[in-house]
Amino acid sequence: MKNSIVSKIMLLILFSGLVAFAFEFNVKPAKAWTGTVYIRADGSIDPPDAPIITSDNMTYTLTDNIVTSGNGIVVERNNIIIDGAGLTLQGPGTGAYVQGVDLTERTNVTVRNLNIIGFHASIFMMESYNCKIHSNNLLNNSNCGIGLAHSDNNIIFNNNITNNPTGIIVYNSMNNKIYHNNFFNNALQAASKDSVNYWDNGYPSGGNYWSDYRGTDEKSGPDQNQPESDGIGDTPYSIYSEGPTALDNYPLMNVVPEFSLTLMLLEFLILVTVTLVFIQKRQNRKTKP
């Protein structure tokens, strides 16, 4: 009896802590809509009951988490914004060739504020141009966090890219800017093939945070030859490349500030949220007559 009471108290403390963190970091309740969402070329949302709303056919905002065994969101319309509102897009996590957000042949699409977990790639870009990918958490995919192929002039910034076989794969893509992202514990942080891109935002803005960077910060300045440290590594970070050399010339020594206090907790809470979704669904099946 005593052990039972202690266990309940510990569970209550844990639950209270999770609730507090959920409110603090804007993680939504453990519920989810199931299926694939299409944003059609005419601006319509298919199916109509999908948890995405728009008032102008330009900004599309999620209103609920999405769990799917196929693709998550397939975008067929240009010149739009997809705002995840801090919600989660959960894939099958089995290595199936499905994408979290598919931007194939899209132009000027922004994807922001979305947690995308367990796909082949969180965001897939094929012949995609002038898109912006920012303020997303992209983790635990079977291939990569972001995949670009034959895609030019895109900007990728302020994302957490975590625990993927490869963080970002860039193939035959030019003039993309990739900076102020956190690359954390990917087996291969980034890969570039037959591509020429910018992996930093110049000095003093800097490049990306790489969890496996082993350089020092003893110097400063555009050439990193001035006295005193500046939060930027003194030597470039080398990206795995087949073809032209790919370098982050100004690797950040610390996690990008927007995420420095929340990165690990947020990822943990996302996983807790998704786990609770599946537990609730299983319980609902058991209680059905």
Image (cartoon, rainbow, N blue to C red):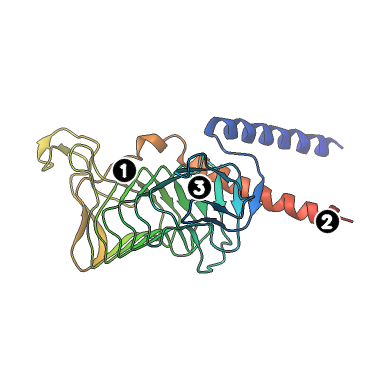
Distance of mark 1 from mark 3, alpha carbons? 17 Å
The reply to whether callout 3 and callout 2 are in contact (CB within 8 Å) is no
What residue is drawn where x is 29% and y is 41%?
A: 253
Viewer-closest of 24 and 177: 177
Residue 179 pos. (x, y %): 29, 46
Q: Is residue 198 among the parts visible in the rendering?
A: yes
User: Measured along the vertical axis of the image, is residue 58 above or below residue 195?
Assistant: above
Q: Which residue is mark 1?
A: 180
Q: Which mark is residue 115?
A: 3
Q: Label 1: how many residues lie within 10 Å, few (<14), some (14-19) or many (20+)?
A: many
Mark 1 secondary-structure assignment: loop
Quadrant in which the C terminus appears: bottom right
Q: Is residue 185 left or right of residue 28?
A: left
Q: Label 2: how many residues lie within 10 Å, few (<14), some (14-19) or many (20+)?
A: few
Q: Is residue 272 among the parts visible in the rendering?
A: no
Distance of mark 3 from mark 2, alpha carbons? 29 Å
Viewer-closest of 63 and 216: 63
User: Measured along the vertical axis of the image, is residue 135 above or below residue 9?
Assistant: below
- Callout 3, which amino acid? Asn
Distance of mark 1 from mark 2, alpha carbons? 46 Å
State the count of labels.
3
- Residue 15, quarter of picture: top right
Q: Label 3: how many residues lie within 10 Å, few (<14), some (14-19) or many (20+)?
A: many
